[in-house]
Amino acid sequence: MPSPSANLDPLAIHGGTPVREKLLPYGRQSLDEDDIQAVVEVLRSDWLTTGPKVGEFEEAFAEWVGARFAVSFSSGTAALHGAAFAAGLGAGDDAVTTPLTFCATANCILYQGATPLFADVCDYTLNLDPHEVAKKISSRTKAIIAVDYAGHPAALDEMREIAGQCGAVLIEDACHALGAEFHGKRVGGIADMTVFSFHPVKHLTTGEGGMVTTDNPRLAETLRRFRNHGISSEARDRQESGQWFYEMVLLGFNYRLTDIACALGLSQIGKLEANLARRRAIAARYAREFDELTAITLPAVREGVNPAWHLYPIRLNLESLTGDRAEIFRALRAENIGVNVHYIPVHRHPYYRERFSAASRAGGFPIAENAYERLISLPMFHAMTDDDVADVVRAVRKVIGHYTIGVDTDGMNTEKSEPLHALASRQGDRSHV
């Protein structure tokens, strides 16, 4: 255990007073009376499941992100599955994706009987590295699933080029990135299909829910049928036209989103601009406050990109610290700062280790694995107050100051070595902070 500096307050984990009295979570939903009233109105209506609010929400969402079509699903995972199905993935096919993501990104490939191939990530954004993706391409490659990690769009131009060369479908997992911009365009109409999540910690929530956007009418129709048991018509359409006949034309699932959820989503769309602005303001303050803490690396941003900041992941420069990630994580939690870790690399999970032993060997994806050992996600959600943000800043400075080798009374590294993210930018890396 490190010896706390006499010039710093004792850490809560060592018996000191926590920065906060109550835990600040890393993310949470934000609902107001307008949201509640929108749901109540649906509860009093004739439709609770797939009614008029579904179509209204899909149309409003498609317009907001700049896509021709939007197809809603019961969860982000269901939406990923729908995209994998619409891409034509099946037995004997491969799909390339990142190991540094929630397991649902890779699981949707398995749901279709195809094989996930992982490619390592770029050190600066932790998104898929196009050069590593290119190494995985073969005649079996049917799709590339690029994740917008933490809300920073992937290298979509490069991914489109690779996908085009091998005839693969480009699926953008934008579950972190609603509202993110790539060269002046919102994500949602850039990839062949873009997947969003409406989990409570996201920019917009429907409780649970997801969406796939696309400009391709054939893909949109396949997605609609897939989420509705493979049936070629909707119950509401049949009722309104006085028809009873329907046909199942493919093997689908019951992945429909309800009118209740869509009413909430419609209400929340009106708050998206403000939610994004708040998250970006929080990210900007974190960047200012932590810029001189050389024991951590801040998230980088590629030129031409405006992230949505679902997460704010810092990386610990363990060479400058006397504790490992687990100890610093516990210390921050003891200060009542609800930090988290995103993510355990998918290939490290027991199921993947057992089923794909060769591809899951240690060291196979050095950048993703190295990042995982250092990552800590700080609280980031649009309902955070200025006082909440100040508490995070104070706790990070307090904890990092105690564990940094050679600190002054402000918790700064007295050697003043240049932060890794700034060094990369100065040396011509494609990212900037």
Image (cartoon, rainbow, N blue to C red):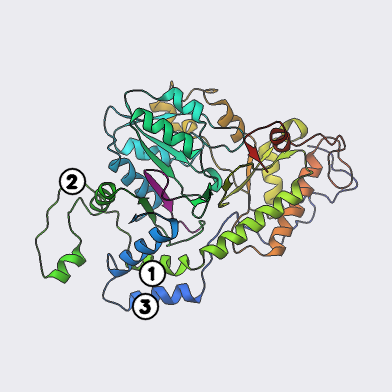
Q: Amino acid at mark 1?
A: Ala
Pointer 2 residue: 250
Judge the density around disc 3: few (<14), some (14-19), many (≥20) Cα neighbours within 10 Å: few
Gap between marks 2 and 3 measured at Cα:
34 Å
The secondary element bearing badge 1 is classed as helix
Residue range highlighted in magenta:
188-200
What residue is drawn where x is 74% and y is 53%? Answer: 393
Q: Does any portion of residue 249 appear in the rendered image?
A: yes
Q: Quadrant of the N terminus?
A: top right
Of pointers 2 and 3, the one earlier in the residue sequence: 3
- The quarter holding residue 366 reads top right
Q: Is residue 410 left or right of residue 23?
A: right
- Magenta-span inclusion, residue 231: no
Pointer 3 residue: 41
Instruction: Check residue 336 in the rendering and tell me which mark sits there, or answer none.
Output: none
Nearest the eye: 220 or 407: 220
Q: Quadrant of the C terminus?
A: top right
Q: Is residue 291 left or right of residue 416?
A: left
Pointer 1 residue: 263
The secondary element bearing badge 3 is classed as helix
Q: Amino acid at mark 3?
A: Glu
Where residue 177 appears, as percent x and y from the top left, is 50, 50
